[in-house]
Image (cartoon, coloured by chain):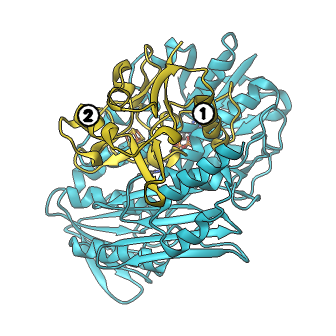
Amino acid sequence: MHKALVMEADACTGCHQCEMMCSYGKVGAFNPSKSVIDITIFDGGAVNVPSTCTQCEGAWCMVVCPVEAITVNSSTGAKEVSAEVCVGCKVCTIACPFGAINYDVDSGVVTKCDLCGGEPMCVEACPTTALSFVAEDSTGYDKMRRNAILAAGIEEGIA
Amino acid sequence: MHYVIAGAGPAAVAAAEHIRELDTDSKVTMIGAQAQPPYSRMAIPYFLTGKVEQKGTYLRRSDNHYAEKGIDYLHDEVVSVQPEDHSLSLASGEKIQYDKLLLATGAEPIIPPVPGMDDPRVQQCWHLEDAERIIDLAKPGARAVQVGAGFIGCIILESWVLREVDLTVVEMGPRMVPRMLGEKAGGLLQTWCESKGVSVHTNTQVKAIESTPEELHVVLESGETCPADVVIVSTGVKPRLGYLQGCEIKIDQGIVIDEHMRTTAPDIYAAGDCAQGLDFSTGETAVHAVQPTATEHGRVAAANMVSNNDLPYKGSLNMNILDTLGLVTCSFGAWEGVDGGDSAEMFNQDNFQYINLQFKEDILVGANSVGYHKHLGMLRGLIETKIPLGPWKDRLIANPVQIADAYLGANEASLKSS
Ligand SMILES: Cc1cc2nc3c(=O)[nH]c(=O)nc-3n(C[C@H](O)[C@H](O)[C@H](O)COP(=O)(O)OP(=O)(O)OC[C@H]3O[C@@H](n4cnc5c(N)ncnc54)[C@H](O)[C@@H]3O)c2cc1C
Ligand code: SF4
């Protein structure tokens, strides 16, 4: 069974370590604007919400892509973007109801979470239990995934 | 069971593959009136600029993809459909029997009824072959006139500039992309294009194209004449339905389909640019000739064809994103607003930034943005989940930029209460 990245807002302190490590892993520099996981801080720090791609079943980004630039990594289940194939049309960025795939102006292609090949750096960087990488049947993960499925109105199993 | 799909574009391929996923045994035949493997029209702009080779426009990369999936791909043209005996006739003379048929024949460009359109230097940008001819005509330094600044026009416009042609755009509407952007956003886009050296004429139509051996003269209703080496026509599209003449099937703006993607003819479904399906925003039917609708229609049609109509479709959300010379604009759903609704707006002319949000009670129903490219999909999520924004509505009205905050805040609240 694949593992899933589970995000618990309640445990997040808003330290941004995950964004730092993510960008380091992706572009070799500590630059949160290049991170594919985001921490959003509300109410002056009282609530911090991590968000990234849930590798959802519907995979709206992958289905809509006109050139097959997004494919599933069979060992991790992650939907991965090939920077060589992507033409930068951005249609996936509006198709994803999570807003979890975004255009990067510098590279001219889109970026999203690829679970770092099975060892997510954000999870390693997280000093609390806000981020964990666990078996897919955990409740939190299920809820997030259901949300994505609802968003496009297509039942699980068919999507 | 024999599933037949007329067409070989995004809607057809999404359907063929999904049928195969759901039914591993039946025969699946896909028929495309084109010489190439299935390709994406929307990747053509990147072929024009040389970002990808022709192969980079193909929907699937492996040469044997369709054979490996057990999908028979015929290069042929459907010339008629006979619902009475579940058959269709091909240009090659062959006749094919189907159990279930999907019509996914897409659209074709509308050519305005103006004298001079038949000159070979006047081109549409629709098929890969058109792109090849344009590459020959639009050499660096050439003068190009693009007729039409609809959404496809605004996407391909960038290709001419990158090809270093001297570009003039003529749009009969009051602004660029009038069906996707309002006055302020369309105005920003026009100023942006002009700042990049493109000459833009709005509110005027082309009256005639006069040819001399050396050049073309594009005569505008306003009285002006633009000299050109090449003219690109991008004045809208209409469903490609010639083969349905005389067939008992309801056609309005496109082939009319119900929430199961069924046409009015038995065992015939339709999907993509040729179909007039349920519109998520209005509850009526409409043709949404965009890639997300094509692929979604294809999958939902496939599921209904295989399951005997078990999957009602929520309707397609009309949405679009354009990158015009580096300025990203997008639109979702009821961006023009709904009766009795509220709205939020942010306009920063100097930074080329704009946001328009439309609400019905505390639910987002439509949006535009200019100059943003992060988390745009959240707008779709907010609209399609109809998630109540609660306190976030007023915060968005006060500061429309907080879309990601509102999305996460409203989602957190609904997760907690569920
Ligand atoms: C230049 C350009 C840029 C675009 N950019 C975007 C964009 O950025 N975002 C976006 O969302 N959309 C964009 N679009 C629109 C998008 O490409 C279409 O919405 C999409 O291709 C529709 O898919 P479809 O499968 O319904 O139809 P099509 O792609 O038109 O495919 C129709 C298929 O049917 C075949 N066919 C037609 N008639 C017959 C027949 N009688 N017999 C057999 N086969 C037949 C054709 O050969 C073709 O294979 C763009 C379009 C163009 C032209
Ligand atoms: S931006 Fe890239 S990955 Fe996204 S749909 Fe376009 S080509 Fe595919």
Considering depth in this image, is B383 or B119 the residue closer to the camera? B383
Question: In terms of image quadrants, where is residue B206?
Answer: bottom left
The image shows residue B409 at horizontal and vertical percentages of 56, 54
Considering depth in this image, is B304 or A98 the residue closer to the camera? A98
User: Taking B320 as reference, is B418 above or below it?
Assistant: above
Q: CA distance from mark 1 to mark 2?
A: 25 Å
Same subunit, labels 1 and 2: the answer reads yes
Q: Amino acid at mark 2?
A: Lys
Within 10 Å of the Cα at label 1, are there few (<14), some (14-19), or many (20+) other Cα atoms? some
Q: Which mark is residue A145?
A: 1
Chain shown cyan: that is B
Label 2 lies in what chain?
A: A
Question: In terms of image quadrants, where is residue B213?
Answer: bottom left
Tell me the quadrant of ligand 2: top left
The residue carrying mark 2 is: A26
Q: Please tell me which residue is depicted at 74% across the width and 42% down the height of the picture.
A: B313
Can residue B222 be seen here? The reply is yes
Q: Amino acid at mark 1?
A: Arg
